[in-house]
Image (cartoon, grey):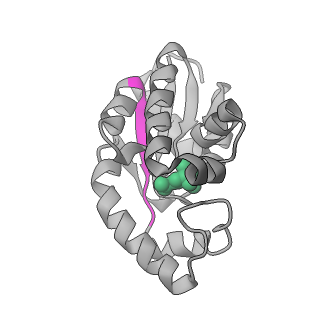
Amino acid sequence: MKRVVLVGFMGCGKSTLGKKLANRLNIPFIDSDAEIEQYYKKSIGDIFSEYGESHFREIEKSFIKTLKNKSEFVLATGGGMPCFGENMSLLNEIGTSFYLQRSPKELVNRLMNAKKKRPLLEGLTDEELTSFVETKLSMREEYYRKATFILDRTEQTVDFIQQTIHLLHPLQKN
Ligand code: S3P
């Protein structure tokens, strides 16, 4: 039973790597934001503006519980998901978690052009984005670091994660 959970800050590359990994392992890819948007038929931005962030966090928590019935997947979590309540423990119960660690500087560069679809970043100047990322990351890092594996930039590859999973489940084919 392969359940892989990718955690990390907005813009660290969870979805891109997650899709490739799911493809390689031949198991479903799940993007928590996309699933929530599909279920509520609203964008994450609209959920934030209509119901508020705390409601979104409740939705995320309920979403994690729905994964208990699924046997195999690669999950790309929303950047804040692991950092509320017991979510990181719940994620560790359902799968093998990997923290895609990136420096604040790298994250800021990656997020510069991707502020639009992320409600927490909307309207921030580049300077505000920098201080937002530094502050938020330092608050969230303790949760992300509860992941089973912490991967630096060079380890954030399909091959590396596949090999790690293979060590955990040596008898499985992929
Ligand atoms: C959030 C990250 C987003 C999304 C929402 C809130 C956060 O997901 O869940 O905008 O609090 O960090 P990504 O990490 O995929 O951008």
- Which one is in front, 7 or 149? 7
Q: In the image, 33: left or right of 55?
A: right
Direction bottom: furthest residue = 127
Q: For residue 157, say whether it is visible.
A: no
Q: Is residue 60 magenta?
A: no
Question: x, y percentage for residue 115?
Answer: 63, 68
In the displayed structure, 139 sits above or below 158; it is below
Where residue 84 sits, quadrant-wise, is: top left
Q: Is residue 102 left or right of residue 85?
A: right
Asked which quadrant contains residue 23, the reply is top right
Q: Residue furthest front?
A: 50
Q: Where does the image place residue 73, in percent across and percent down from the top left?
A: 58, 26
Q: Residue at x 61, y 60 (%)?
A: 118
Q: Give the residues drawn in magenta, as a range.
A: 94-102
Picture quadrant where residue 103 is located:
bottom left
Asked if residue 101 shows in the view, the reply is yes
Can residue 100 be found in the magenta stretch?
yes
Query: Is residue 101 shown above or below 37?
Result: below
In-front residue for pair 46/35: 46
Q: Quadrant of the C terminus?
A: top right
Q: Residue at x 50, y 50 (%)?
A: 52
